[in-house]
Amino acid sequence: MKTLLQTALTLRGLVALPGLVVLAGCAAETGEHRAFVASEIGFGSRTGEQIDGRDVAIGLNLDGRDSDAQDLQGCRRRDFIAPDGTRGIDNQFTHLYELVEDVFQEGVVEGIIKNSINEGRLLLMFQISKVTDWKNDDDVEVAIFLGDGRPNINTENALVRDQTFDIRSDAPVARTRGSIRDGVLRTEPIDVELPMAFFNVFFDLQLRGAQIQAELDMDGNLVGLMGGGVDKEQIFEIGRMADAMQGEQVSPLLNLLIPTWTDLYPDERGICSHISAALTFRSVPAFVFDDVRP
Amino acid sequence: MSWILRWGAALILGASLGLVGCEGEIEAPTVATRPPPPFEPAPAQLRRLTQPQYRNAITDLFGEVVLPARLEPDERVDGLYQVGAHLTTISARGTELYEAAAYQIAGQAVDEAHRDRWILCAPSGVVDRACAEQSLRVLGRRTWRRPLSEVELAQLVEIGANAARRLGDFYAGMEFSVATLLQSPHFLFRREVGAETDGPRRHTGWEMAERLSFFLWNTIPDDALLDAAARGELGDHPRYAEHVDRLLADPRAKQGVRAFFTEMLELDELDELRKDPTIFEHYTPELGASAREETLRLIEHLVFERDADYRELMTTRTTFIDRRLASLYGVPAPAREGFGRYDFPESSERVGLLGHISVLALQAHASVSSPTLRGIFVRRNLLCGAIPPPPANVDTSIPEPLPGSVTLRDRVARHLQDPSCAGCHRLMDPLGLGLENFDAIGRWRDTESGEPIDASGDVNGIPFSTPSELAYTVAATPDFTQCVMRTAYRYATGHKEVPGEAATLRDITGRFERSGFRVLPLLRSIALSDGFRRVGAPVITVDSTPSGEVSP
């Protein structure tokens, strides 16, 4: 059981630790821009319901397929279905998350994430720019980066809106393009790298092909999902480091379970290298200082 | 042991100097428009130091020391503590507070970190009367803003010598001398009674020194000003204007201007700013101080850096904000630490002082805005309009919503429909409703309860439809510039103007207008005016108590 606990804590670091680096992109400074900072981050998971015999889960269709147990391209993993009926939802990470939730009290994971946000260690920021129409715009630019600064918190333990932050100097800005249709922003895939530290273990976690789907709510918040693939080797490595640091045996369990959940980027043998994951977020309007525009 | 010495010191000085009471009510006169009556100055008065003046004086005397948290409260009369200062005296509780403060400060004044600032010699022993006299003569002149008499000085030296002998330490003895100086009415009160001259009664040079320094610096005179007083160069002397100009050019003039506008705009009340944090996420206990600093920095910028037209206070799009205020305003912070300049775009409705949190949040309730409070502020503090207090039997709470009423405008509409309310509320609600786009903490809102906000109203019959139009309309009202002139005059002289000062006020008004409504020339005009330099005879009132004590 303690092994499971170690695993859970280690994986929790995926979202609870700072540093976000991504690659690629270019920007044009025309149109409007708005920045947001994630005040809440959680894991997309199964809702406990079923539609058409499929489990309902929060997530994105990352590979454009609606896979089932026969789909080799999906490594024979059954995709989920979204609450709105969208098929092909890739979020096998939910199995690991549910395992963690079984071990820990409900809300512990969210609490740790929340603390990281409120203490300014996980200020996940988005800037949407080159926008001419916030309802429909075929070509917008999205920057993803980590903010720096001590945030103010309101009585609901959430970030106060419209705060101004720096950009973490050790976390280069990731840029991608996207579109807004009927108020919903969708971005093109981009590789995101999360430099993390956990129990004195430092590592970079890569979120491959990360995509964002989000929309502005009535209060001007950007609410949505960020999905992507987590390399199983990365998870194994985290397990090994945790074993070494804590003297536990996380790795055998991970070695056993993770291969049964990988569902992205199959090789020629039909073996997938990544496990799909989805993070939910609610971000409030924010600013970055003029001299550090992303 | 020490309590005996304390009371001994207090009694000696109390008996020898005599705490004098303060004068009462001045009739609320109407300044005649034409022709002004001959100049006749207001009666002489005593003014108690306000709490900021007390603290500034202590800092000037001894440097950075821990200042007392509590002193006798100041009283705002006719909108100003400076006016209230001549109507208040010291209560029994206040006496205790001043005594405790005096010993708290004196204890620090004689410690190694501070004593070299004012003890001018190395004592030759536990009792060194010569050294004590040398130091107390200089310290006493600054503390009491006049030279000590030889009798007074001898008493202070003796108090210190007695204490030093008993405590076995020269500096411990001096602590009691300092505490005595600080408990004296000569320190706590400003004597502004003047003296008979060949012509009209005038303030003495020493009175002019402290009158000037408290007006322009909000603290005690420096040695140069006291030296000028000693040379007889203050008041009617040809060099008087040079001294006024020196004070205005000194960095301490910023402290003085800040103090004036803090009183005029009631910015000190921001220390008590409270909002419901469950409704207003931007509220923190530190918000009030930030809001005050924003307004004062803007005033400093306009007055000292730009020497600008006072009306720009209402129309400027420039302000100075920190991260907390930027977040509340919904704009990027201009500085990582402290305050930085921010210019609102032309499209913004947040313009000038009426867009500041210091006004919008202070003149509102904890959870809802208040067109009435905001209207009173504009009418009374910015336009110097009179608003009668509500009748004693009137319910002053916000009216309950009528069926179909959604916005606060709907609710306060009852004020204007009810004949018993309308007379006064017509003076304030139409002004305050122009700021309804700002909620109770001052954050912008387009709607209230889902309904678009109607921010229209009128200033003395001149209509406006948005907050920025309200600001421009107020700025263009002659009452606006007249009000700051009148308020500054009251602040400087410590009294509400009397009919005999009408000519002086008219002259100051003309000079203010010709200067382009600039604040520093206004303060200079006031300092040079007869109303500031001349004084009437004290009004003698006979106390109705059995003792029949007479006080000026």
Image: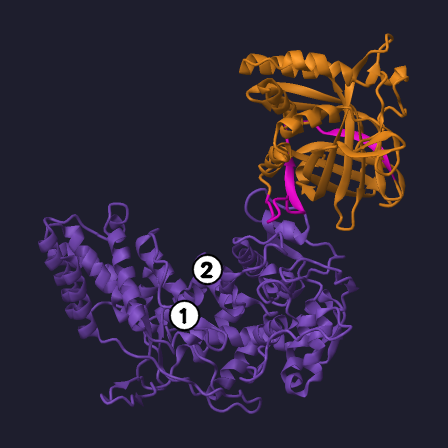
Chain colours: A orange, B purple
Instruction: Tell me the quarter of the picture where residue A207 sits.
Output: top right
Dot 1 amino acid type: Asp
Residue nearer the viewer, A34 or A90:
A90
Rendered location of residue B36, percent (x, y): 53, 90
Q: How many marks?
A: 2
Q: Which residues are magenta?
A: A152-180
Give the residue at mark 2: B255
Rounded to the nearest whole Å, what is the CA distance between mark 1 and mark 2? 19 Å
Q: Is residue B138 magenta?
A: no
Dot 2 amino acid type: Gln
Residue nearer the viewer, B220 or B147:
B220
Q: Earlier in the sequence, mark 1 or mark 2?
A: 1
| Residue drawn at x 21%, y 61% as measured from the top left | B137
Instruction: Tell me the quarter of the picture where residue A285 sits.
Output: top right
On screen, residue A229 above or below A240: below
Same chain check for tags 1 and 2: yes
